[in-house]
Structure formats: C-alpha cells, structure tokens
Image (spheres, grey):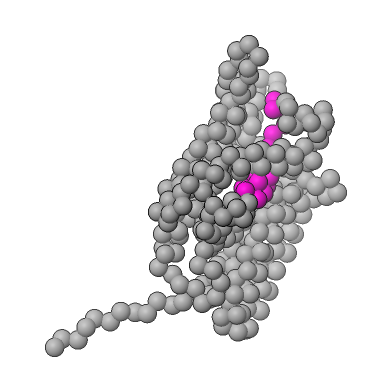
Amino acid sequence: MIEPIAIYSGGIVLYWSSIVICLAVAAWFFLSLAVYAPGGGAAALWILLPIATVLSLFFARAIHWYCHAEQYTGFASAFTNFSLGSYCMPGVFLGVTLAVLLVRLLRFSDSAGRMFDALAPGAALGMALIRLSALFSNADRGKVMVSTPALQRLPIAAAVDNGSGAAEYHFATFFVQFLLLLVLAALLLGFTYRRGRVRMKSGSRYGHTALLFLLLYGAMEIVLDSTRYDSSFLRSNGFISLVQILGALSMLGVLVYYSVHSIRANGLRFYHWILWLVFLASVGGAGYLEYLVQRHGDWYLKCYGGMSACCLVMALTAHICYRTVCEKRKKQTAPEAG
C-alpha cells in the first residue's frame, strides 16, 4: 500500500495523490495535443494548460469543500492544506470549459468546438489513470460488499482495510471505471478520426466528439457513482448525488442539442416523439432503481443491472438523434466496362 506522503524533506511535503494527478494531466495533455496539432494552432493548447490547471484546481476543491465541509477546517483550508479532503471531478470539467472559452475569446484558438473534441479522448485517459491510482491506496470507494470468495479479486472486488487490520472486499468501483474509461478513450479516438469523413445536415462540424464523451461518461457516472459510499451530494439533497445529477443533465443536453438540429434538418417527425418518450422513460426507470437500491441493500445486482440498461438506452436515443443529422454517404458504384 502506498503511503499518502511520497516525499518529505524539511518543509516540503509531496503526496502520492499529487504525483498521480500530475501524471494524469500530462497523459491528458499530450494525447489531446496529438489529436489537435494536425489541424494547426497547437500553441493554443500550451496556453490552455496553465489556465485550465488553475481553474480546475480551484473549482474541484471548492465543490468538494461545499459537498464535504466536514473534512475541512474552513473554506481557506481547501486551498492551503491539500492533505485534507479531495477533489470533485465536475470542478475539473468546469475549469477546463471556462479555460477553453477564455482561450477562444482571446483568439488563440480558431474553434472552441475543435479544442473540446481534442480534449475529450485525453480526458478519458487522464481520469482512467487517476482512478487506477486508488488500487494502490485504501481509496476504492465501493460500498457494495463482495462476500463470494470466487469474486473477491479484480476486476470485481478490491481489498479495503476496515481500520482494525482486517481486509474487507468491496466492489472495485474505481478499477471498473478505469477499464471503462480506457474503452471510452479508444472509442473517442476512433470516432474522432471517422468524423473527418462525416458531413452534417445542420450544426457545426466540431464538438461531436466532446458531446459523445459527455453522453457516455454521463451514463457511466449515473451508475458507478451510486456504488460509492463517499458520493458528493448537494446540501439540500441527499438522494441523488451531484455527479448523478450532472450526468443526467449532460445526457439530456446532448439529446436536446441533436434534437434541435435534427428538426432543423428533417422537420419534426414521429420518431422524434418516440426517442423523447423512450429517453424520459429510461430516466424514470434509472431514478426508480436508484430509489430501490437505497431501500434494499441486497438488490444491488438487479438494480445496478437495470440502471445500466436504462442509461444505455438513454445514450442510444441521443446517438440515434445524432445519426439523423449526419448526411448519408452515397454508395460508389463500379464503373461500367467499356
């Protein structure tokens, strides 16, 4: 098990979490740079890096302080004592989004959408590395106990010290998320390079990789954040976590965006109503299953299986809406023999 402090020299204290986060940010940045550079203007990402780092750090700590104030001695301690508390991922997304918009406003970038598209695969890779780091500490936050000996191993379960020296096996939430984020990074890279051959009937040519990231990451977090025992909640709501709320809103936002452009390109059709109704029914199903899993501690498998299915359906409806905005490729016919 890795100790929280990696280097202690005089008044300098360096924590393992800080090292892992720096490595994750580096992986995020250089993958994004590899995607963005061929289109020109790579200097914009170098300008973006320090701005996004500062803003992300501020919002990630501020939101975590808001949701977990009991872990801090005050708001100022969230920025002066990094041995306390943790970080909240929505703050990172907010910081990066504001940084991209600022870089675009200052005209260092030709398109905010193109920059978001380049950042999306790197974001999945960077977050995967952060989640993997939890395996080397006592931080895998799965609340589901795994009692079957055959399942008490990765990728299903991870050992957690219960405080008395004995090991308990909990669902390996972070490791499962690590695997899913690696798959997501690969999917986004493939989608990015295929997007160059796709023309749109309506809307910008950029931003679709970023929207796909929001769609799939939102679906992932709605389920996985429910399995954590340290989820972040709004102070006025203890039922659905902040991450789950933002995940659902992200998926809804993607559906709304493509619905608007689909109607502009094709007119309001019957299939639009079907997609919207299916999406709303899936949201209701996921919410009801979240209620059940909180009331029945032994229904984890059924409830989380059902929630996963609902989230996949939500993602599928938004993706179908996206497909209706894409121009169909014309089939090339072989030339006739002369």
Estimate the x, y position of residue 22 in percent, counting from the top left.
Answer: 55, 33
For this orientation, the residue located farthest to the right is 236
Q: In the figure, 29 relative to 332: above or below?
A: above
Is residue 15 something that shows in the picture? yes
Q: Residue furthest front?
A: 106
Residue occupying the far top of the picture: 10
Which quadrant would residue 87 be assigned to in this image? top right
In the current view of this chain or complex, which residue is farthest to the bottom?
A: 338
Answer left or right for 31 relative to 301. left
Q: Residue at x 58, y 25 (%)?
A: 16
Q: Nearer the viewer, residue 161 or 322?
A: 322
- Seen in the image, is 110 located left or right of residue 259? left
Q: Nearer the viewer, residue 79 or 337?
A: 79
The quarter of the image holding the N terminus is: top right
State the residue at coordinates (68%, 45%): 91
The answer to whether residue 140 is magenta is no
Numbered range of the magenta stretch:
82-99
Residue pictured at 56% horizontal, 28% vertical: 19
Magenta part, dominant SS: helix
